[in-house]
Image (cartoon, rainbow, N blue to C red):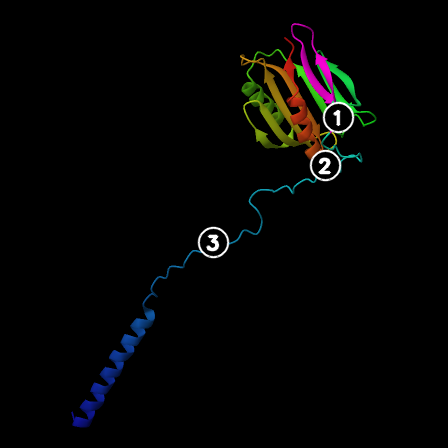
């Protein structure tokens, strides 16, 4: 074989080897890649969300104002008689045995504001009465929000189911000095527009309550 022929043969061998290497690389499986997981926003919530139900408008009646005039009253019979003050000119309605509700003369019977006083005989402490009232409200009404709570007082707002209005209610319980059982209950209730007057009413009446000796 001549030198030229040998060179040509070696060249073909090198080309073949190179081609095989390239072909082998092309036939090798591509290295596996790991995609980075990123949070994907949901196209819709996983559970239904009810929009907040707006409250209905309150009745058109003048708001309760602070600094009313008061008169002294009695509730119960001796030896279970108590004294308390109620706003002058308000009218009393008997709601139960030893239970009176006071409203301004001419105010609608629903949707406005009022004061309620009651003698109680449940043999529970004021703190127990607070817990009992809160549990009853949370069970029986929607949108109950506690605004204030102590060992003898509970203040909250709630949705009135009948009229769909927001109501503001505060209860307070009283004991005979030296005892720990609640004997007297008072409450005030009204609208958002009445809240300053309700606070004043609560303080004024609460400070007047006492057991007749």
CB atoms of marks 1 and 2 within 8 Å: no
Give the distance between the C-alpha atoms of the residues marked 3 and 1, in whole angstroms.
65 Å
> Disc 2 to disc 3, how far (Cα)?
47 Å
Magenta-colored span = 68-86
Circle 3 SS class:
loop
Local SS, label 1 = loop
Disc 2 is placed on an element classified as helix
154 is higher (above) or lower (below) than 94: below
The CA distance from mark 1 to mark 2 is 20 Å
User: Which of the 4 quarters of the picture holds residue 163?
Assistant: top right
Q: Which of marks 1 and 2 is nearer the N terminus?
A: 1
Any mark on residue 193, and which? 2
Check disc 3 and report the residue beneath it.
39
Farthest-out residue, right = 106
Residue at 77 percent of width and 18 percent of height: 93
Up-down relation of residue 65 to residue 153 (above or below): below
From the viewer's perspective, is the residue at label 2 or at label 3 nearer?
A: 2
Counting other residues with Cα less than 10 Å from the Cα at mark 3, is it few (<14), some (14-19), or many (20 or more)?
few
Left or right: where does residue 19 sit relative to residue 192? left
Residue in the image at 31% along x and 74% along y:
23
Q: Where is residue 15, by image quadrant?
A: bottom left
Q: Residue 12 carries which label?
A: none
Q: Mark 1 points at which residue?
A: 69
Q: Which of marks 2 and 3 is nearer the N terminus?
A: 3
Kindly tell me whether residue 166 is visible in this rendering: no
Q: Residue 54 at x, y = what percent? A: 70, 40
């Amino acid at each position: 074989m001549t030198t030229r022929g040998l060179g040509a043969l070696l060249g073909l061998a090198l080309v073949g080897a190179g081609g095989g290497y390239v072909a082998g690389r092309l036939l090798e499986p591509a290295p596996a890649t790991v995609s980075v997981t990123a949070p994907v926003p949901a196209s819709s919530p996983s559970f239904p969300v009810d929009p907040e139900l707006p409250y209905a408008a309150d009745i058109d009646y003048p708001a309760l104002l602070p600094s009313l005039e008061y008169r002294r009253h009695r509730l119960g019979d001796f030896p279970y008689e108590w004294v308390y003050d109620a706003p002058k000119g308000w009218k009393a309605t008997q709601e139960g045995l030893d239970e009176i509700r006071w409203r301004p003369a001419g105010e609608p019977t629903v949707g406005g504001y009022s004061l309620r006083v009651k003698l109680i005989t449940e043999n529970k402490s004021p703190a127990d009465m607070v817990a009992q009232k809160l549990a009853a409200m949370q069970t029986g009404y929607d949108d109950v929000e506690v605004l204030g709570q102590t060992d003898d007082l509970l203040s909250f707002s709630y949705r009135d189911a009948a009229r769909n209005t927001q109501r503001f209610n505060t209860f307070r319980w009283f004991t005979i000095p030296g005892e720990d059982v609640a004997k007297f209950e008072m409450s005030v209730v009204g609208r958002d527009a009445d809240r300053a007057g309700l606070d004043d009413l609560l303080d004024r009446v609460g400070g007047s309550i006492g057991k007749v000796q």
